[in-house]
Image (cartoon, rainbow, N blue to C red):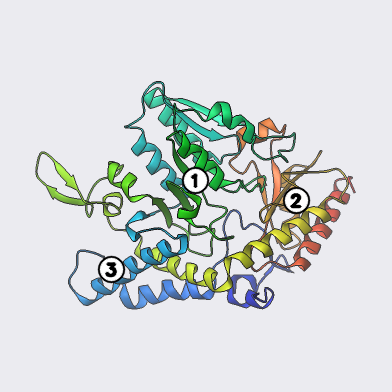
Amino acid sequence: MPNWSNLRSDFPILHQEVNGKPLVYLDNAATSQKPRRVIDALVRYYERDNSNVHRGLHTLSMRATNAYEGARTRVATFINAADPAEVIFTRGTTESLNLVAHSFAKKLQPGDVVLTTEMEHHSNLVPWQQVAKATGATLRHVPVLGTDAEGGLDLAALDSLLTPQVKIFAFTHISNTLGTINPVALLCARARAVGAVTVIDAAQSIGHGPFDVRAIGADFVAFSGHKMCGPTGIGVLYGRRALLDALAPDETGGGMVVSVNYESASWKPAPERFEAGTPNVADAIALGAACDYLEALGRDAIAQHDGALARLAYDQLATLPGIRIIGPRGERSGLVSFAFEGVHAHDIVTFADEDGLALRGGHHCNQPLMRKLGLTSTTRASFYVYNTEQEIDVLVASLRRILKFFGGG
């Protein structure tokens, strides 16, 4: 088991003060901090190997190409893909989900159904809205249970919702607002039984615990590097090879073609056909370094650590007057969202910043879910490998100070 306090030294950004107080970074669901290993990988590439990939025969280009494709292989191993060709590099989860949605738009027709859930991030909702409008397909949603969504998804509703008319079932692994951990293997199995293709938003889960695409039975999985100790601007779309080869590219240009004449073009196989233009070489290489770092810590240990912090935070926050905590009380991922009547989440975050705390306030790109819960916003504290129990004490003390200021403590 890692020494969680000691590994903070791996993260240079944590060793600073904000407003004269030690930084307490609790905004990891938005983006995680980067260990020295990842930063060094970026610097090393730009100082030593910077060159365009795949098209050059000189030494730098070959080194860059080997490192870039090596990162693809590393990511494939990290998620247990059957083939590195099933890993497509994108800008992040949003682009990955849009790639699937836009490519599938060519296949859907009136009478087909796209099924999502009521807890989806906008990135796994809005693209499917646009696809439904463009094709005449119907968009439906699996409900969440409970006035604070403490019951998770209404799995009983799958009996009526998951019919042979469903061609795509898109769902999140972990809710970025509720902290709910959905039974993705079960959902994939249920979808497969009716012939539906599954699309998993794994942005909040990929760096917080084990993730095996083959054990889960996923067809497509989308995630971002910056939420798993990697850089911003790099993400992954995993797709089963047979499905990828059946999809037309959403973006065309250089690097993804076999042959071009003035009238037409033909495409390379996956993954090249989905990576038009010069790829984000440096950040892909650094993402591979992030995979190495998390693997060395142990992803089971990370899941236990993050979950324990979230449960401790839930219990301590529940002692505050007038608080409303949403999501499950028991098993949850490493985040807790809450609201106070009469105090806006933005005020909470602004005042907490005076105490050196980095929190997130707003609708968290979950506006339909917020409306269902009768909220406009929540404050969210989200935890990762470098957070400690002592930082939860700082959070609670800060919130008590804020509530007193607003007359609620």
Q: Nearer the viewer, residue 371 or 19?
A: 371
Q: Is residue 19 above or below residue 135?
A: below
Q: Mark 2 or 1 closer to N-term?
A: 1
What amino acid type is highlighted by mark number 2?
Gly
Instruction: For marks 2 and 1, give the CA distance.
Output: 23 Å
Q: Nearer the viewer, residue 82 or 224?
A: 82
Q: Are marks 3 and 1 in contact (CB under 8 Å)?
A: no
The residue depicted at 72 percent of the width and 31 percent of the height is 374
What amino acid type is highlighted by mark number 1?
Ile
What amino acid type is highlighted by mark number 3?
Thr
Q: Mark 3 or 1 closer to N-term?
A: 3
* Left or right of residue 279, residue 253 in this image: left
* Left or right of residue 61, residue 195 in this image: right
Q: Local crowd at mark 2 within 10 Å, few (<14), some, or many (≥20)?
A: few
| Snapshot quadrant of residue 373 | top right
* Left or right of residue 84, residue 314 in this image: right
Q: Which mark is residue 200?
A: 1
* Left or right of residue 50, residue 327 in this image: right
Q: Is residue 26 above or below residue 344?
A: below
| Snapshot quadrant of residue 151 | top right
- Location of residue 71 in the rendering, given as x and y in whole percent from the top left corner: 38, 67
Image mark count? 3
* Pointer 2 residue: 330
In front: label 3 or label 1:
1
Instruction: For marks 3 and 2, give the CA distance.
Output: 46 Å
